[in-house]
Image (tube, rainbow, N blue to C red):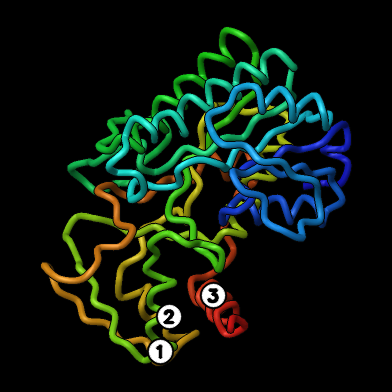
Amino acid sequence: MAAGALDTGAVLVTGISGLIGAEVANRLTQEGHRVVGMDRAVPPGLPYPALTHDLPDAHRWHEAIARYGIRKIIHAGGVSGPMLMRDAPARLCDINLVSLIDLLEAARIHKIGRVVWFSSVMAYGERADTLPVGEDTPLYPATVYGATKAAGEALINAYFAEHGVDAVALRVASCYGPGRTTSCLIRMLVEDGMARRTTAIRETPNRTRQYIYVDDVVDGICAALGASRFSRRAYNIGPGRAQSLDEIVSEVRKAVPEVSVRVRPDQGMGWNTFGLGPLSIDAASRDLGFNPKVPLAEGAARIRDTLMKRP
């Protein structure tokens, strides 16, 4: 993103303890932009100011915007996947959906210049085929988590159409990287390989894996934050193709040769698979210049290097 594209005010980044929030806040800070962080608990030693926000809390949005002169917002906070809070769906809706309503209302009142929010591949739900999936594909989420994303997109469309709130949703596939803490096949392969353990994997027919490294996702976020206009209010962000299990294992072995797997149809973990085809990234490529660059082997090597530095 060109320097100066965000110099008219501060950028609020939520979810700074998470994988995407932390990386995009660091990127913007390194590029010289004024960043304010937000999360339920604030990590120590940050190079930018931050405040706590236990979602949903409508007043906290207004306080942050007024105190720090916020002009753009990246909302990466909230429940980050369908594997979390499965036994508390109402609370999940409060965190993911009610907080978005509060944010859009604050953006309307304070005339925020741009809001970037995270939808998910899970908003599409399950499909009978594995053909490429474009943004105009109907959304039929099969999880409460996915439903919060589909509903959030509807709100973004409505707030833009009726009130001019300039918000955009990014439908992200399986984002991975050293900071991911939820279930991730690539991280598990690296960890098991380094420990010389065999990774048990459940392979299910008619499902896809679509991994994208966090730096590529951050590229898409920064492009969305600085774009002059959009042709739509939601964009797919992913590798642009499906990755077979054999390909993933082969690429991770380039970083950790000791990787060993045991594949069975009924045992092991079925990490990060989707019952639909690869997300088409044509629209993001056209409107945002989005072009994933980090190959799986390099992403696995970065995870390996991070793990080797830990006690």
- Residue 34 falls in image quadrant: top right
Which corner quadrant holds the C terminus? bottom right
Q: Residue at x 82, y 46 (%)?
A: 2
Nearer-the-camera pick, 33 or 216: 33
Q: Amino acid at mark 1?
A: Ala
- What element does badge 3 sit on? helix
Where is residue 53 shown, x and y percent of the image?
A: 62, 37
Q: Is residue 5 above or below residue 177?
A: above
Q: Which residue is mark 2?
A: 191
Q: Report the Cα–Cα distance between label 3 and label 2.
A: 9 Å
Between residues 42 and 48, which one lies in front from this camera angle?
42
Asked whether the beta carbons under mark 1 and mark 2 sit within 8 Å of each other, the answer is: yes
Residue 147 place in picture, x, y as percent: 34, 31
Q: Label 2 crowding class (10 Å Cα cut-off): few <14, some 14-19, many 20+?
A: some
Q: Mark 3 highlights which residue?
A: 303
Q: Could you say whether the residue bearing mark 2 is in a helix, strand or loop?
A: helix
Disc 3 from disc 1: Cα separation: 14 Å
